Image (tube, rainbow, N blue to C red):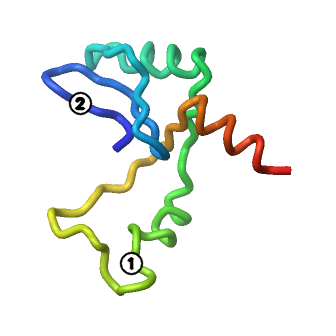
Amino acid sequence: MTIERHEGRLQVSCNHCPASYPATYAEEDFPVMVADAMTAGWKIRKVDAAAAARRGDGTADLFGTPAKIAGSRRHESYTHTCPACADRWKGSQL
C-alpha cells in the first residue's frame, strides 16, 4: 500500500521496501504531505493504468492466479519510492 490511513491520519509508504515517510498528516493536509515527502527526496509518480493492468499481481503470470488468499490488492494510481530505493535504482541504471 502506498498511502496508509489510520484513525484519520495519512502516511506515505514506499512501494518497494517497508520504509514510510515519518510524519503523519490529517486527511485535509494530503497535498502538504505529498509536497513534504517530495521535498525529502521521495519520488511520487503517476502510474500508467494500462501498464499496471498488464503487470498483474505477484505470481499470477506463473500460476494463473494471485498468490494472495486474503482479498485482492487494489491498483494504486501513483507509485511512491523512498530516497533509499530511488538511490539504489539510480546507481543500478547505467
Q: Distance between the residues labelled 1 and 2?
A: 27 Å
Q: Mark 2 points at which residue?
A: 5
Q: Name the residue under label 1.
A: 60
Q: Residue at x 17, y 63 (%)?
A: 71
Q: How far across and down, in percent of the image, does residue 69 sit?
A: 17, 69
29 is higher (above) or lower (below) than 34:
above
Q: In which quarter of the image is the N terminus?
A: top left
The x and y percentages for residue 44 are 55, 34
Query: Three-letter amino acid code at disc 1?
Result: Ala
Would you place residue 4 above or below residue 27 in this image? below
Q: Is residue 6 rendered to the left or right of residue 55?
A: left
Label 2 packing within 10 angstroms: few (<14), some (14-19), many (20+): some
Q: Which mark is residue 48?
A: none
Residue 50 x, y percent position in the rendering? 53, 65
Q: In which quarter of the image is residue 7?
A: top left
For the point 31% across and 14% down, which residue is it? Answer: 25
Indicate which label's residue lies in the foreground, 1 or 2: 1
The residue lying at 29 percent from left, 33 percent from top is: 4
Q: Where, by quadrant of the figure, is residue 72 drawn?
A: bottom left
Give whichever of discs 1 and 2 has the lower sequence position.
2
Mark 2: secondary structure: strand
